[in-house]
Amino acid sequence: MNKNYIYLTLLLIVLAGGLFLLPEKENHQHLDPEDLMWSIVQPTRYVSTDQVAKRIIEGDPTLELIDVRTIDEFEEFSLQGAINIPIDSIMVPEYQDYLGIEDMSAVFYSDDDIKADQAWVLAKRLGYDHIYVMKGGLNCWIRTIIKPERPASTAAESEFELYSFRRGASMYFTGAEIAIPDDESKQKVQVARKKKTVVAEGGC
Amino acid sequence: MGPLIPQGIITGEWDFVIALLMGIFFGFILEASGFSSSRNITGVFYGYNFVVLRVFFTAVVVTMIGLLYFNYMGWINLDMLYILPTYLTPMIVGATVMGLGFVIGGFCPGTSYTGVAIGKLDAIVFTAGLFLGIFIFSESYPLIEGFYNSDAMGRITIGEFFGVSNEVVTFGFVLLALAAFWGTWLIEKRVRKTVTEYKFD
């Protein structure tokens, strides 16, 4: 038997045994504070209540609403299709399965921005992307979508368009009835009779 | 530093270029190891040639040890490596089918192409059968889809499943590989009278 085979065997055993001497290595990718700062100041991490309402109404399958309030608050009122991850449970692995789903954009919301923002920063530190915060939270939702305020008559046309969208969204979410103007149905059908044409008669 | 593509050091557009280069190297190593000959490959089942076992076991233990040292040096992040999801029963059945094809046809999919590349008739027939098999599998996929996706265990490693560290698994594999190297050497010497030792010059 060739001695070199024995050397190679010993080399493999030494290399493999050497692995036990290596210190434990943590591979957590710590988010650089500067990177975190730049992502926090980006306004694109917010979505407005109007955008969320539009996406719910359109049935956008990539929207994942995450309610970070407590379970009681969630059961009392929540947005359509939202899931509940209380902010103190965000570290639970079972809940984290809901974050970082490919092609899904997770939108955090709470009563206002604060808890949702905290959840956002935590999720960012945990290394998740495609996460957003619903600007203004549920307070803003009620103010803009559920009970939209009529803009002043001097407001720009775009504001009226937004208002009419919000009215429509409000009906969608609250189930309010559309008020059909009464007089329209009672309007009499005006039959326009054909006037007899008078042919100019000329004398022969 | 690594893995390079998930960290965006190399962009995803290079995937096919890298795949092509790696394919060329893989084919070269297969051919250089004598895997384009079905006699060499099936020898492992008849006990006269264990080169397949030695080449692949060497590749496995070198990669295992290397990855762990690279991870320690910070050259590669083990947590970012892609791990194939495990479907236990379908994988056992699939591996059995693959092994049967291996011992009957004398090639595995990769080596059949190296055989085609050097013009071996049996490899060409094998490759035609391979495509026929792929076609039959694809057409009958709706029938076996349930079984195909059953028994999903997710992206789990041997260490995670048994609750031991990667170092222990690697050490175990090295011992297993060495035992296999020495054991098959003894079998080979007995079965094949003309066996020659590699001379280190």
Image: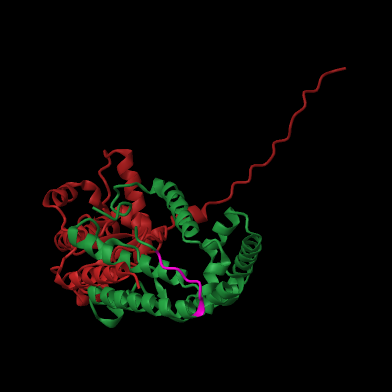
Chain colours: A red, B green
Q: Point out the residue furthest to the top here.
A: A204
Which residue is at 43% across, 80% downward?
B88
Q: How many marks?
A: 0
Image quarter of residue A59: bottom left
Q: Is residue A77 visible?
A: no
Q: Position of residue B60 (x, y in %)?
A: 36, 68
Left/right placement of residue A119 relative to residue B41 reads: left
Principal SS element in the magenta part? Answer: loop
Q: Which residues are magenta?
A: B191-198
Where is residue A17 drawn, in percent x and y? 20, 73
Q: Is residue B196 found inside the magenta-colored segment of the image?
A: yes
Q: Is residue B199 left or right of residue B106?
A: left
Q: Is residue B81 visible?
A: yes
Q: Is residue B124 positioned above or below B194 on the image? A: above
**Which of the 4 image quarters holds residue A195?**
top right
Question: Of residues A196 and A46, which is closer to you in this image?
Answer: A46
Q: Which one is nearer the viewer's eye here, A5 or B1?
A: A5
Instruction: Provide residue B18's location: percent of width, then percent of height.
Output: 41, 49
Whether B84 is among the magenta residues is: no
Residue at 58% x, 53% y: name it: B117
